[in-house]
Amino acid sequence: MTSINLSTGDLRTIFTTQDRYNNPQDGVYQIYNIRKPDSNTNRKNLIMISDGIYNMKALLRHEATNKFGTFNLQKGDIIKVLIAEPAILRDGKKYVLLIDDFELLESGRSLVNQNCEFLDVYLTHHPEEMAQIVTGDTVTNDAVPKVEATNSNASSISANSNTTSVAQATKSTNSSFSHNNNSSSQKSRPIFAIEQLSPYQNVWTIKARVSFKGDVKTWHNQRGEGKLLNFNLLDTSGEIRATCFNQLVDKYNETIQEGKVYFISKARLQPSKPKFSNLSHPYELSIENDTIIEECNDVSTNDVPKTNFNFTKLDSIQNLETNSTIDVLGAIKTVNPHFELTSRAGKKFDRRDIEIVDETGFIIKVGLWNQQAIDFNVPEGSIVAIKGVRVTDFGGKSLSMGFSSTLTANPDISEAYSLKGWYDANRNNTTFTSYNSESGGPVSGEGLKKIISQRITIAKAKNDNLGRSEKGDFFSVKAAVSFLKVDNFAYPACSTEGCNKKVIEQTDGTWRCEKCDVSFPSPKWRYMLTISIMDETDQIWLTLFNEQAQQLIGLDASSLMETKENNPEEFNKITQQIQMKTLDFRIRAREDNYNDQTRIRYTVSNIHELKYKSEADYLAEELSKSLVF
């Protein structure tokens, strides 16, 4: 088989020739290196590519990111770039090819040239070549632009007293999302889609609607005190979170209004913090002193959507991982009374539960908190769209509103009108499938049939390579517990509400949490249980976190730890009773990197006790379908 030829020298051509720069598609390159995963930025899609002479950085985006996981790209693989965009970074001396889609042509090939020259170094030593794509003209050495950084967020090129932004020159000729508007202060600025924003664009302006504005939050700790304000920005391409701190909170708290449209530029892009945000954008905006925010008053705002939902049907929630953040649309079936909860730390919370249903025939509880729980007055039968609600799984799937969650009653969207019509016509003759607080799953006949019908074998899960996709895969198996690792089944955790970090035992016998800067007389133990399960086809190891392990064992981790220390015989009895017990396991498979090796890690998202009558009824029904009379 003839080896595929690389597009020799093409990477240099892209950044030195105007025509190729404007159309950087169809190049054939080799994977020169793959960046190790960075847990801090969650950026696992930065690679090095080579054309046989030069190598450079490439950032995979959009469909290319999905293919990266699907094909499991390795060093030496040959790809053909289908959709791409060149980018020039901060000081005009760093170059990246942004790849949106590619085709895998060949795998497992040795490097064509192990000593390729790094393109950034070459262009730094040959700036006259780079100048041609900035100006579009051939220039002499006497007219070579001087590259100088003006601030941390922009780079400029000065040539014959004319200053042109490198990034602006790049984006104004290439961005399919850019257009001019009628605002006098924005006439010359290209408008970018939120989806496109990344640290590789330095000069940009977005036109976006404030879809959510949070309350001002304050903090006090050993390092000082301060305050912050969060708000979400939305356009037709996506949504991104923005944060400002301290004196900027005072500046923008009154001017930034939920629902209004603004032009925003010169904010700093940084990796998003999933713990504090329910948005999918990999980055967020940090509002700084030189950030420009202008209200969009004199141009139409009809091209900016008012909200952006990505609804999850209620019957799909059983497949989601705990703490997932989703959008749901439902009809309110029940509004329960407001009540008060007290945390282990003694703090009191207001709470109200409502139940919503949809046309899938499922019903689920939604928890409202604090002032929203007190003030809630939406009547039963109304349609509610809830954005950014968190999936919880303590004894059964439910939903919980967070500080950045929003609830809109009777939204003016087609899905709401459709659901309202269905609910009014069917609410009195539909038996809704609930998420049982004991079994952690649906308990009605139809719900159990769905669980049984979706099962596969362990061997099939392995043969289908489940877990190789970017977000992982879910599957269900009926299997028996063959072994429990009881040596380290739990870890000592912080007792502070919502922390759960591991605590360290001190010399005085107390347990200290470094995150909370607090010591406790004793820890709160939390499960991290490893078990082996088997069916008639194969065996796998599973990890069970606190809620799922407690569901399996029937005791919380602290109680089981106390039993192990004080009554070993009873401890052995409890653990041995679980061995060879057959259950329905809902499993999440996901790729994991450990010691530079890739493996599939299996975790339990739900456990269902077998209901043998339903199992028999399902089998009888399936057998009857195959009978020929």
Image (spheres, helix red, strand yellow):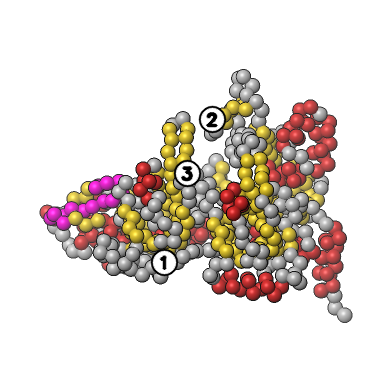
Circle 2 or circle 3, nearest the eye? 3
Along the line of sight, the residue nearer the viewer: 183 or 90 = 183
Q: Residue at x 83, y 57 (%)?
A: 611
Q: Earlier in the sequence, mark 2 or mark 3?
A: 3
Residue 10 versus residue 581 in the image, above or below: below
Q: Badge 2: few (under 14), some or many (20 or more) residues near its Cα, within 10 Å?
A: few
Along the line of sight, the residue nearer the viewer: 335 or 479 = 335
Q: Residue at x 69, y 53 (%)?
A: 337
Local secondary structure at mark 3 = strand
The tag on residue 304 is: 1
- Magenta stretch in the rendered image: 149-162
Cα distance in 3D space between marks 1 and 2 = 45 Å
Given the image, on which type of amino acid does mark 1 rest?
A: Val
Q: Which residue is mark 2?
A: 517
Magenta stretch, main secondary structure, is strand
Q: Quadrant of residue 319?
A: bottom right
Q: Which corner quadrant holds the C terminus?
A: bottom right
Given the image, on which type of amino acid does mark 3 rest?
A: Lys
Q: How many dots with numbers?
A: 3
* Residue with the most extreme right position: 629
Q: Position of residue 429 (x, y in %)?
A: 76, 72
Q: Badge 3: few (under 14), some or many (20 or more) residues near its Cα, within 10 Å?
A: few
Q: Quadrant of residue 234?
A: bottom left
Q: Position of residue 165 (x, y in %)?
A: 25, 56
